[in-house]
Image (tube, grey):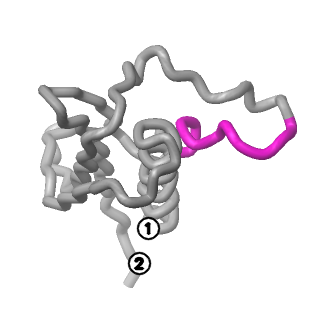
Amino acid sequence: MQCRSITRAVDEALTNIVRHSYRNRLDQPIALYFRSAKRCQHAEIEDGLEILLCDRGRAFDLKTLRGRPLEQIRPGGLGLHLIRQAMDTVEFTSKGLTNQLRLVKYFTQTSTAP
């Protein structure tokens, strides 16, 4: 289930970059970087996945972006909700010409019965 949620979050983020940052131009670059992440939570080390999406389109302030209200039934506008719901960390930064969206998901350990 976590795999599907992460995949959907990355897909939504890529769609938003193309649609909003690049204004539907499909010939613009987007770089993706994946690396392992760790954090100490409640005296336990949790492993995770960090995904960086970098583009050179129009910058946005993630704090001012709002998805549509969930009670409105219509297509579109749920990307930010899906991204924030799926990921533990969602951070947007812009440095010079490069925009970077940092997504992190930590994985909970599941115990299996013998």
Taking the image as drawn, is residue 5 in sight?
A: yes
* Residue depicted at x 22% and y 52%: 50
Residue 28 point in image, percent of width and height: 33, 54
Type of the residue with mark 2? Ala
Q: Is residue 109 left or right of residue 35?
A: right
Whether 110 is drawn above or below 18: the answer is below
Residue receiving disc 2: 113
- Magenta region, residue range: 73-82
Q: Earlier in the sequence, mark 1 or mark 2?
A: 1
Q: Secondary structure at mark 1?
A: helix
Residue 33 point in image, percent of width and height: 18, 58
Between residues 45 and 7, which one lies in front from this camera angle? 7
The label nearer to you, 1 versus 2, is 1
Q: Are marks 1 and 2 in contact (CB under 8 Å)?
A: no
Between residues 97 and 79, which one lies in front from this camera angle? 97
Magenta highlight: main SS: loop
Whether 99 is drawn above or below 26: the answer is above
Q: Quadrant of residue 32?
A: bottom left
Taking the image as drawn, is residue 85 in sight?
A: no
Q: Is residue 76 magenta?
A: yes
Name the disc covering residue 3, or none.
1
Whether 23 is drawn above or below 7: the answer is above
Name the disc covering residue 40, or none.
none
